[in-house]
Image (cartoon, rainbow, N blue to C red):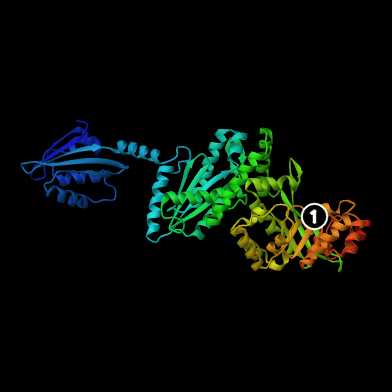
């Protein structure tokens, strides 16, 4: 027989036993003589270690209680070594009973393996979409009972570039690296799943929106670190994350997944590089971004493969530069034409690559905006500039340029507040420059961000005035205190004086101060003084300089700076 068998009489004495039973329980046939009691059979089995941690009396009392019921039944018995035995019990008419025993350890392991493979991704070993859906349903069921949950949808930025440059085998290693880091970022109750390709999702039961955002920020930071791919080298990627919460946003799996996916779309194509929590305004923004991207593709010739590859490689190198310290700041003073003293210093990001050399901001800023790196880049510039400014002996303002995409980030004002707190810089010493060359979307997200920044107490300046969307309504909407005239208006032109005079008068009539950028000659300086320009900035007074030069420069007036330039 493939099963073990034991026959007992009405007094629970062994009457028959076969070799298979002895093999299953690692017992010797000679030690199981006919007539031995059931209790002694169990005692022998316990003595050789079949029931670790259990006493023979406990086992016997449970089994005896079942035998005395005189009922037919099958149950499972766990033995040492993670073995599992199926026991079928059959009472006999004469009061005795018979049991068959089958070792089903390997069968159950095979079944468990089949079930595991059916519910997990073969490459990353993370739960697949089937198990993910089950866990999401469970979390939403709890949310309907008052226990909030959150859903994070993730999409890797730069993964295709790794595949194209290093091959699909390297891409597989990277996906495994990502899976391992995701598991370290979440708790035991959470579920991180791979839904396909480079798409992942995380279910966070018993989690508020605030906690979900913190988890998403932790994931973003962890996945943005360098990934070691063994023989394939290293890779740098980013991640876009959309967040939706139940029951706040939806109380069913399908709608919740759809909303988290919309937030993901907005996060990925807004270019801010930070997790976004779903709201209705964000959905409208996502639609606008999609339409804008479609119109751009329709209205322009597709990039050649070489150009696409160049941009992808540049984005990957920029991500590496940001994490390895190849980005640094230079500072250029802005002088008051009346007091001849510097009133602010503009922070300018510079990229010195070990291989490429100096990379122009005109080249890497658009790449940052299109690759989701503009958020991390802006945050780094803000923190570095605020820390530096807090150490200056002269309490002048420090200005940092923003991308319009930064204002589309719902948590941007909170990020600025955190950076001010960390650096110790007073809010009124920070200037945020908004470029006028790109029209700001008129949305609740942008309007709320502008409002929160004003409440925070930072100054808003409009940069590159006259290069794009100049109008009175735009100035009023942004509530800027200073306007910087684009350097192009200082280029020689027969109507130069009239145009500059009109622009300066327009801005000052709005109650704002004017900065002229690109002041490079004494003629420029003299003209601007005659026209009543408030502030000046340019190579005539000083080129962008290293942080260690700033303190000495701030102690000099404009006249001293001019003398030094002439000398």
Q: Residue at x 17, y 44 (%)?
A: 73
Could you tell me residue 566's position as x and y percent? 94, 56
Residue 181 seen in the current view: no
Residue situated in front as seen by the camera: 130 or 447: 447
Count the numbered circles shown.
1
Could you tell me residue 490's position as x and y percent? 86, 54
Q: Residue at x 90, y 55 (%)?
A: 521
Residue 155 seen in the current view: yes
Residue 120 appears left or right of 286: left
Residue situated in front as seen by the camera: 17 or 148: 148
Residue situated in front as seen by the camera: 58 or 491: 491
Quarter occupied by the C terminus: bottom right
Q: Residue at x 37, y 55 (%)?
A: 141
Could you tell me residue 55's position as x and y percent? 24, 51
Residue 15 appears left or right of 173: left
The part of the image, by quadrant, that contains residue 440 is bottom right
Q: Residue at x 78, y 63 (%)?
A: 507
Q: Residue furthest right?
A: 567
Residue 423 higher or lower than 254, as above or below: below
Provide the secondary structure element on which disc 1 rests.
loop
Which class describes the residues within 10 Å of circle 1: few (<14), some (14-19), or many (20+)?
some
Residue 151 appears left or right of 162: left
Residue 63 appears left or right of 10: right
Could you tell me residue 347's position as x and y percent? 75, 57
Residue situated in front as seen by the camera: 190 or 466: 466
Q: Residue furthest left?
A: 94
Q: Which residue is mark 1?
A: 486
Quarter occupied by the N terminus: top left
């Amino acid at each position: 027989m493939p099963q073990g068998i034991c026959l007992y009489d009405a007094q629970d004495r062994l009457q028959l036993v076969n070799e298979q039973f002895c093999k299953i329980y690692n017992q010797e046939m000679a030690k199981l003589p006919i007539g031995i009691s059931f209790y002694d059979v169990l005692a022998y089995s316990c003595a050789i270690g079949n029931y670790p941690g259990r006493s023979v009396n406990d086992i016997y009392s449970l089994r005896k209680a079942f035998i005395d019921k005189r009922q037919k039944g099958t149950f499972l018995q766990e033995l040492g070594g993670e073995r599992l035995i199926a026991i079928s019990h059959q009472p006999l008419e004469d009061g005795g009973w018979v049991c068959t025993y089958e070792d089903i350890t390997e069968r159950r392991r095979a079944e468990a393996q089949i079930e595991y493979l059916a519910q997990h991704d073969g490459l990353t070993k993370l739960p697949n979409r089937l198990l993910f859906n089950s866990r999401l349903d469970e979390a939403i069921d709890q949310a309907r009972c008052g226990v909030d949950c959150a859903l994070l949808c993730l999409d890797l930025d730069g993964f295709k570039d790794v595949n194209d440059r290093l091959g699909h085998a390297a891409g597989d290693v990277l996906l495994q690296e990502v899976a391992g880091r995701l598991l370290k970022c979440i708790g035991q109750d959470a579920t991180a799943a791979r839904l396909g390709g480079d798409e992942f999702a995380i279910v966070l039961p018993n989690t508020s929106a605030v906690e979900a955002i913190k988890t998403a920020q932790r994931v973003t930071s962890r996945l943005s670190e360098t990934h070691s791919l063994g023989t394939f080298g290293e890779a740098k990627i980013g991640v876009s994350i959309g967040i939706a919460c139940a029951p706040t946003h939806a109380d069913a799996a399908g709608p919740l997944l759809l909303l988290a996916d919309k937030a993901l779309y907005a996060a990925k194509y807004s270019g801010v590089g930070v997790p976004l929590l779903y709201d209705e305004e964000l959905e409208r923004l996502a639609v606008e971004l999609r339409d804008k991207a479609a119109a751009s593709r329709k209205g322009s010739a597709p990039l050649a493969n070489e150009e696409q590859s160049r941009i992808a490689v540049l984005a990957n190198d920029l991500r590496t530069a940001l994490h390895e310290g190849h980005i640094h700041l230079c500072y250029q003073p802005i002088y008051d034409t009346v007091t001849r003293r510097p009133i602010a210093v503009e922070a300018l990001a510079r990229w010195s690559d070990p291989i490429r050399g100096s990379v122009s901001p005109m080249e890497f800023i658009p790449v940052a905006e299109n690759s989701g790196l503009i958020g991390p880049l802006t945050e780094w510039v803000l923190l570095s500039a605020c820390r530096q400014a807090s150490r200056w002996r002269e309490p002048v303002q420090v200005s940092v340029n923003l991308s319009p995409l930064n204002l589309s980030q719902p948590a941007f004002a909170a990020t600025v507040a955190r950076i001010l707190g960390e650096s110790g810089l007073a809010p009124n010493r920070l200037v945020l420059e908004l470029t006028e060359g790109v029209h700001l979307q008129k949305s609740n997200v942008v309007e709320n961000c502008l409002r929160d920044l004003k409440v925070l107490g930072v100054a808003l300046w409009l940069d590159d005035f006259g290069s794009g969307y100049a109008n009175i309504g735009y100035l009023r909407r942004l509530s800027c205190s200073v306007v910087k005239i684009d350097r192009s208006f200082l280029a020689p032109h027969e109507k130069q004086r009239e145009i500059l005079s009109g622009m300066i008068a327009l801005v000052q009539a709005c109650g704002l101060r004017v900065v002229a950028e690109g002041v490079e000659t004494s003629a420029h300086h003299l003209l601007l003084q005659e026209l009543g320009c408030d502030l000046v900035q340019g190579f005539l007074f000083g080129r962008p300089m290293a942080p260690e030069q700033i303190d000495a420069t701030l102690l000099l007036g404009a006249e001293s700076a001019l003398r030094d330039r002439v000398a």
